[in-house]
Structure formats: structure tokens, C-alpha cells
Amino acid sequence: MGIRSFLSARLARRVGPEHRTFAAMTGTVLGGTHAACPVCRRGHLIGDPEAPNLRKCDDPTCGATFTLAEMGRTFALEGADVRDLAREARRQAFVLFLAAVGIGVLAAAWAILAHSRLTLLGAMLLCTVVLASALVQRYRAWQLERGRLFEARAPFGAFVAAELSGLLGRDRP
């Protein structure tokens, strides 16, 4: 009996339908969902392995392709003001940052009162997730302000450089 068969025999008894639903939901949240195809509304736009600047509908009856530039123009034409979207993303990032600080302070006080290091560890992990969400919102605001939404490669290095120069006071708008 191998390790895999041993684990699969044990997990088969412990993983019920509610766990499978949770795992499926977690996969969509962590893996991200693809945008719906605007032509057929049935398929999803996925990246084309041969051309990184193309997105292709995965529905075999549709097969529509869009360039990243077309997707950027479509986003701009939806009537949404980019400055308002960026302001909202920055506001959400600030709220998430405050939530992480509040969670950290309350958990530290609770851990001291309960004499529990595990409470502090759990709070640190929760704060890490909330701070990562705040970073995502800051990145989204930066993308909106610079007009760098749909690119073949994510400009994360340019974002980090802009954030550091903003923090160090070199590039104050």
C-alpha cells in the first residue's frame, strides 16, 4: 500500500459534498475567472498560447478573438470614468489596510489576554491576506491611472517602482 492509496482511502471518508463545493469555490476565487465573451455570452475569454496579446473565446461554436488593445478600448467606452474607478480602488485599499491594522491590534490584545501564541499566528495570517487584498487594490488603481490595464505581461515591476518613489517622496503628484 503506497502513500497515495493510503491518503486517498482516508480522505474519501472525510471529504463530503460540502467540502467539494468549498474546494470548487476556492478554486474559482484563487484561480480567477475569465471574462465572458461579448459575442456569444456563453464562452469565456482565455489567453492564446501562440499569441500572448490575444484572448480567444473557449466556446467551440464562437471562437471570437480579441486583442488586448480592443479590450482596452471596450473598457474605456463603457462609460466608466477612469479617475473615479481609481479613486474607488484607492479608497478600498485604505479601508482594507485599516481593517488589517485593526485586526492585528485586537488579535494582539486578545493573544496577550489569552496567553495564546496561536491566536497571534492566526491573526498574522489573516492580516497577510487582508494586506494582499489592499495591495491588489493599489495595483488596480495604478493600472487605471496609467492606462496599463490590458498588457501581455503584468507591469508589476513598474508598479513597485512607482509605489516606492511615491513613498520616498520623489514623485508627488
Image (cartoon, rainbow, N blue to C red):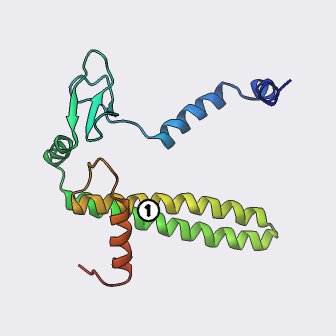
- Which residue sits at x=16%, y=41%? 70
- Identify the image quadrant of residue 168: bottom left
Badge 1: few (under 14), some or many (20 or more) residues near its Cα, within 10 Å? Answer: some
- Which residue sits at x=82%, y=70%? 115
Image quadrant containing the N terminus? top right
- Which residue sits at x=76%, y=74%? 112
- Residue 88 visible in rendering: no
- Residue 165 visible in rendering: yes
- Seen in the image, is 139 located left or right of residue 123? left
Looking at the image, which is closer to me, 80 or 6? 6
Q: Position of residue 172 (x, y in %)?
A: 27, 81
- Seen in the image, is 89 located left or right of residue 65? right
Measured along the vertical axis of the image, is residue 109 above or below residue 90? below
Measured along the vertical axis of the image, is residue 89 above or below residue 16? below
Measured along the vertical axis of the image, is residue 132 above or below residue 72? below
Q: Amino acid at mark 1?
A: Leu
Residue lying at the far top in this picture: please name it.
61
- Identify the image quadrant of residue 63: top left
- Seen in the image, is 38 located left or right of residue 167? left
The residue indicated by pointer 1 is 135
Looking at the image, which is closer to me, 2 or 112? 2
Q: Position of residue 117 (x, y in %)?
A: 78, 67
Q: Position of residue 108 (x, y in %)?
A: 69, 72
- Identify the image quadrant of residue 123: bottom right
Q: Position of residue 94 (x, y in %)?
A: 41, 68
